[in-house]
Amino acid sequence: MNEYHQGRLHGVWALTTRELKKWLKDPVILFMTILQPIIWMGLLGKAMNLGGMLSNLPPQVGEQIMRSTFGTTDYFSFMAVGMISFTVMFTTMFSGMSVVWDRRLGFLNKVLSTPVSRAAIVFSKILNSTLRGMFQATLIMILAILFGLQLSPSFTLLNILGIYLAIFLLSAGLSSLFIALSLRSTRQETQMAVVNLINLPLMFASNIFFPVSMMPGWLQAIAHVNPVSYLTDALRQLTVLRMDVSALTLDFAYLGIFAAALFTIGVVLAWRFLTK
């Protein structure tokens, strides 16, 4: 029994390593993934000097308005943390594309002919996506600090572990969703259409750029069930805001349920629809 479990883990790790090697052999994709949030941070985060709009007010009043609206006196810090969620979201969205490519190139048929389980195939795709998301989020965090991100005084190394855990949960959930949507797909155009259909609503119906409280009522209802909102709030609680333990607990509970539910659905659908 122990050898059986070791064999399953070896299969997962071998498939994950293959995915990571493919990614590292194409540095243009990594560069473009990092460049896009940098452009957003530089052009939007720095250009929208909301604090400057309040310069005619007494400094204490302006700071109070900014803090009551964004939780921090610096909009760039608020928005830069959202760019971490932005990067993680777009990284996981393309996890389903690898399933389509493996099917078209014949690699998926070869794997399905081996003792490796369908669950291991799905989990390797998810693990690859989460590792990539964590790595890219680390780079974005470092760049944001260089650009002027102001960390809260309560920020510690323990907060970093919380950041990675939150990223892992959302990555696992979204990767499972997009992999499930790609199980029967044989055309990359179909998967790209699905990604383009979902990415904008997930991004703009969340708190990446602005607080949920500033949105119209109907959009707030969507943002309150959007998992990206919970990741972004958890990241802000751990980096730039005064930590609210009850809010942070809710964020992790929601992300945990989301990841577990979508992973279960992905594995079940893989057993049913992942065929040669």
Image (spheres, rainbow, N blue to C red):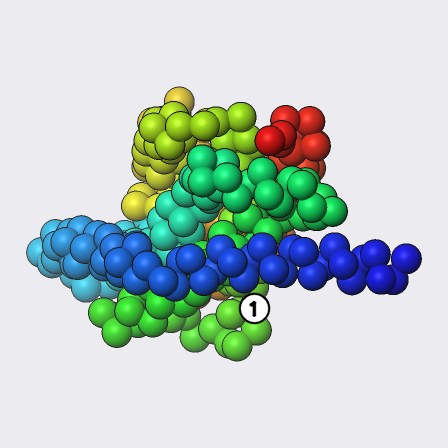
Query: Residue at 56% across / 68% down in the picture?
Result: 161
Mark 1 burial class by Cα count in 10 Å: few <14, some 14-19, many 20+: few
Query: Residue at 26% across / 58% down in the picture?
Result: 28
**Percent from the top left, x then y, of residue 7?**
76, 59
Viewer-side residue, 157 vs 136: 136
Q: Vertical placement of 206 versus 115: above or below?
A: above
| Quadrant, the N terminus | bottom right
Q: Which residue is mark 1?
A: 161
Q: Residue furthest right?
A: 1
Whether residue 221 sits left or right of residue 57 in the image: it is: right
**Percent from the top left, x then y, of residue 209?**
30, 45
Whether residue 100 sits left or right of residue 139 in the image: it is: right
The answer, for residue 194, to whether it is visible in the render is no
| Quadrant, the C terminus | top right
| Number of numbered labels in the structure image | 1
Give the amino acid at mark 1: Leu
Query: Residue at 85% across / 62% down in the picture?
Result: 3
Q: Residue furthest top?
A: 218
